[in-house]
Image: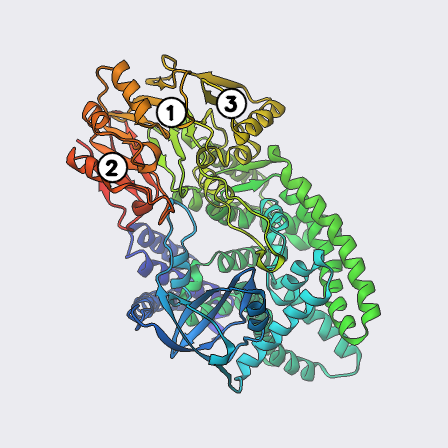
Amino acid sequence: MKRLSGNYLFIAIAAIFGIILAHLSYHPLVGLSILLYFVYLHSRGPKIVVIAASVCIVFFTIYFELYDEYNSTKLTGSETNLTFKIATAPDLNGRTLSTVAKIGNERVNLRYTIQTKNEKNELTSLKVGMICRFEGQLLLPNKARNFNSFDYKKYLYYKKIHWIFSPTSLSLQNCTQQAPTPYERLLLIREQGINYIEKHFPKDTIGIAQALIYGERGYIDDEVITSYQSLGLVHLLAISGLHVGLLTGAIFYIVIRMGFTRESVTHTLLCLLPIYTIVAGAAPSVIRAALMLMILLSCIRWKKIYPIDSIGIACFFMVLINPYLVFEVGFQLSFIVSLGLILSSKTIILRASNPLIQTLTVTVIAQLFSFPIIIFYFYEVSLLSIPYNLLFVPVYSVIILPLSILSLLLHILYEPIGHSFMFLLKMILNILNKFALYGAEVNLLSLTVGKPHIFFLVGYFILIITIFKMWERSNRKLIVVSIILIVTLSVVDLNEKLLNPYGKITYIDIGQGDSILIELPFNKGTYLIDTGPKTLHFETEEWKKKRRTFDTGKDILLPYLKSVGIRKIDKLIITHGDLDHIGNAELLIQEIPVEELIFGAGPIEKEFEQQLVKKAYEMGIPISEVATGDFWKSGDYTFYVLAPYGDEQTSNDRSIVIYSEMGGLKWLFTGDLGKVGENKLIATFRSLPVDVLKVGHHGSNSSTSEEFLEHIKPKISIISAGVNNRYNHPNIDVLNRLLEKESIILRTDQHGAIQYKFRGRSGTFRWVLPYNKTILKPN
């Protein structure tokens, strides 16, 4: 073991390589990375590390294959009457109850829609460890429906969950309380603590106090957590190594001052840390911090161990127990940032001349090491991140965390004193949260990068590590060279669209509505046709209100646009004023700069149209009105406006209709054009050949007439419609008419997002569902 001292990290990295190699089906790029890794190991010696790393890669490659193979379900999906054990604290969120239940050794997600307020009150007594029997239906989790979007099915798969159980009813009469296991007792303590904070703390402090003490972020206000994410502060709302270290250090100091020996305190902490890990939610960052501290404490008495070894050993055992952790963003950020800080602690951080410079150094190191991961998962960074971290990290560490813990403990012991601390906590958090919300609103200082290509990601990590190596050696020339290289790489990454010869037309799966993104090659134009439906939030009883409601604009449209690096929209085209087309437009223009807003000729009558026009005027966005005969050109691409004419009687027939040729195909975008409008097009344009038709009005029978199809003869027809929508779109008669014309039908409700990627006069279609990303090459 001595010969490996200081080298355990390399063994852990080898384990991660083995898992990734198996996960990516032996991708040659991973193989090349492993080869370069061994060249590096061989150059630095000793040989035992090379041998150990080799054995580790082989072992973890085989281990992951077997681990993944056995991650399967024994349920068929036809089971309706199930007996299960409540495995996690039930979450009552509005009308939804959700928890994880165990059926034998298999875990399922249980989701139930609560019917009445009395039933909700009754279900608060549902606890971890209860054995219940209910009738219901097993459902498959939803897959990702858009490119780069959150994949709920994969998320559950990594937690070894394959089904969602939806009970027809839920009554505690069908449940019996069993004697809880030690693990379940800790979960019950955690649940009681979370509920205690919810019941007794001021509303503005509940979410953050729960997050800092118990690792529960579900109660934090949506606007607050969004602002923290955009400013790179969200790590403060998770229990991290800093929190665990501060608590452990405080306990160690207090107990030593009380007269206990170091040995007894060490033994006590070694027993308490695993307990605290479970009570704090057992997130990857908590497990990593607790494991590192336990390793360091264990070695205090009989053997010195380097901090770099502790992180290596902790990483090794975590991926040995659960290899899927490698793919969790929390695990990646926790280890990469911790590793960067440990590597820099003696050679860089301790060189700082005063505490302020030291804090700045730590912040810069943490931000740089986390940068590639942040842009890969969240697609944007804020230039305010470093100054905000400089302020918020010390305040959270020295004031907010201790105040949260003291408020809880003192309120339990003596309520009046606890209330005083809570009031102070509320005042400070209100100031901090307002400051965070203000910073998040400064869009000019937020930079949308988009999801980087793997080569850019690898390049960022190599250059960041090089910068710190040169910083350690005080090699100013190579530091400057490395900084110039990373800035150059960032500029190329940010302007990749200017060099990209490919264009894309993406039918975003926005639900029951339309939203089509057109990206021309070499960034010659970015056009968005409609923005999809606005999620309406109606007034409801207090017990029915969710902590956070789904929003198509915030949860689908904006994340997708940011993931593909959209920082500016040249033309936002609102085909007509119906809510399923214009719904997210106001949100969009506040989040992403829009150069021109386009409406069709005719009266602006609908409420949402009028609101959008007013907002655009306030923001200084130019507004244009188009009608048949108008067109615009960008490079080799011309977009012709075929309708409206200006005298239409209905909103649908006033839809802007656009015709263009891209990637060797002729495209027709029709909005919600009805049969009256289609007949006008037939009469006006005697020849209108179409390769790809955006089927009007989501496949409603009021559009896509026999005469219109005979006139345009589309080879491919794309229908944008929501899954199981209440209008039953697309209509069966429309589908039959398209099939009779031998038109290939693509539907967002069946295929998810649909995309045509082209270069010059050729291209290919791909879509999200099914997961084989079927490719269609049109003739």
What separation in Å lies between label 1 and label 3 (alpha carbons)?
14 Å
302 or 144, which lies in front? 144
Residue 565, given in percent of the width and then of the height, sits at 46, 36
Answer whether labels 1 and 3 touch (C-beta < 8 Å). Answer: no
Residue type, numbered disc 1: Asp
> Which quarter of the figure has residue 138?
bottom left
Task: Identify the mark nearer the N-term, 2 or 3.
Answer: 3
Q: Nearer the viewer, residue 92 or 610?
A: 610
Spatial CA distance of label 2 from label 3 is 30 Å
Tag 2's secondary structure?
helix
- CB under 8 Å between discs 2 and 3: no
Which amino acid type corresponds to the residue marked 2 in the rendered image?
A: Val
Look at the numbered disc 1 and give the secondary structure of its residue: helix
Label 3, secondary structure: give it: loop
Q: Residues within 10 Å of mark 2 (few under 14, many from 20)?
A: many
**Residue 273 visible in rendering:** yes
**Which residue position holds label 2?**
734
Is the residue 294 above or below the residue 25 in the image?
A: below
How many angstroms separate mark 1 from mark 2 (CA)?
Answer: 18 Å
Disc 3: which residue: 604
Sooner in the amino-acid sequence: mark 1 or mark 2: 1
